[in-house]
Image (tube, rainbow, N blue to C red):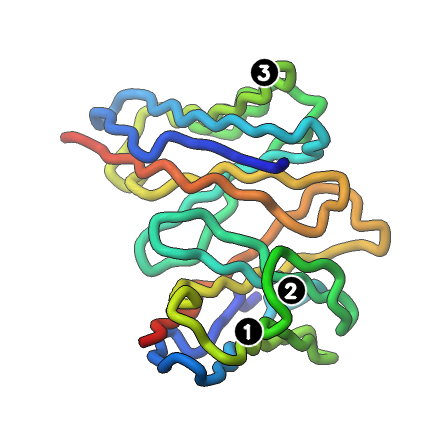
Amino acid sequence: ETGVTQSPTHLIKTRGQQVTLRCSSQSGHNTVSWYQQALGQGPQFIFQYYREEENGRGNFPPRFSGLQFPNYSSELNVNALELDDSALYLCASSLRGQGFSGANVLTFGAGSRLTVL
Amino acid sequence: GEDVEQSLFLSVREGDSSVINCTYTDSSSTYLYWYKQEPGAGLQLLTYIFSNMDMKQDQRLTVLLNKKDKHLSLRIADTQTGDSAIYFCAESLDSNYQLIWGAGTKLIIKP
């Protein structure tokens, strides 16, 4: 059973550029969530994808967008990068039933560290 | 609004028990979680508790929940150097699609 893998592990961009981060879900999982973790803080929820559709969104502007593919892998895209977007971006997969009841047990990848200059 | 708070640091001696505390504000929390983060690694789920329970034990870990005071704690018995990490408390609400996280408590082990 493979875990959650994210790529790239580190990247540096400049303000105004665009970035795409990738995530492969753990085998058997059908839901992907993305979180932003700034230095010294807890993760902040960006959005969640279930059945290839955005299922919920945190307080992030529309320049943060995502995709989920039929194999449950996912991408996070950020346009018009700002300095404050510098953070560790965490992908987490989970297995959710249709009713979304029960504990939301997330399996996290090691993250993609983005630096915006 | 939703808020989860933790103290930033905890220092304990090897072999002692560690108690990491967390408070939350939203009374509609359904589950509460403890995650561990080591340098360069992802967040690892340690344990979780349903909001209608008041205690859960799993080997060296004991979780206590006081729903009236909105207070959650994680006790680690016989703390070892391998327990050095940042511990995050998180809650999920009725909507259950996101977790709300504290800022994490860094556990420092003294020899």
Point out the tag, 1 or 2, that comes first from the N-terminus.
Answer: 1
Q: How many other residues sit within 10 Å of disc 2, few (<14), some (14-19) or many (≥20)?
A: many
Q: Which mark is residue A23?
A: 1
In this orientation, does residue B47 appear? no
Point 72% across, 31% down: residue? B28
Question: Dot 3, crowdedness within 10 Å: few (<14), some or many (≥20)?
Answer: few
Q: Is residue A90 left or right of residue B84?
A: right
Q: Which residue is the site of mark 3?
A: B69
Residue type at mark 3? Asp
Q: Amino acid at mark 2?
A: Val
Residue B16 position, x and y percent, is 27, 21
Please state which of the two labelled residues, at mark 1 or mark 3, is closer to the viewer: 3
Q: Which mark is on residue A32?
A: 2
Q: Chain of mark 3?
A: B
Residue at x 65% of width, y 64% of height: A32
Give the label on residue A57, or none. Answer: none
Circles 1 and 2: CB distance less than 8 Å?
Answer: yes
Q: Secondary structure at mark 1?
A: strand
Q: Position of residue B88 (x, y in %)?
A: 45, 40
Location of residue B95 (image quadrant): top right
Q: Position of residue A1 (x, y in %)?
A: 57, 66
Residue at 71%, 23% (x, y): give it.
B52
Q: Label 3, secondary structure: give it.
A: loop
Q: Same subunit under labels 1 and 3?
A: no
In the rendered view of the protein, which quadrant contains the C terminus of chain A? bottom left
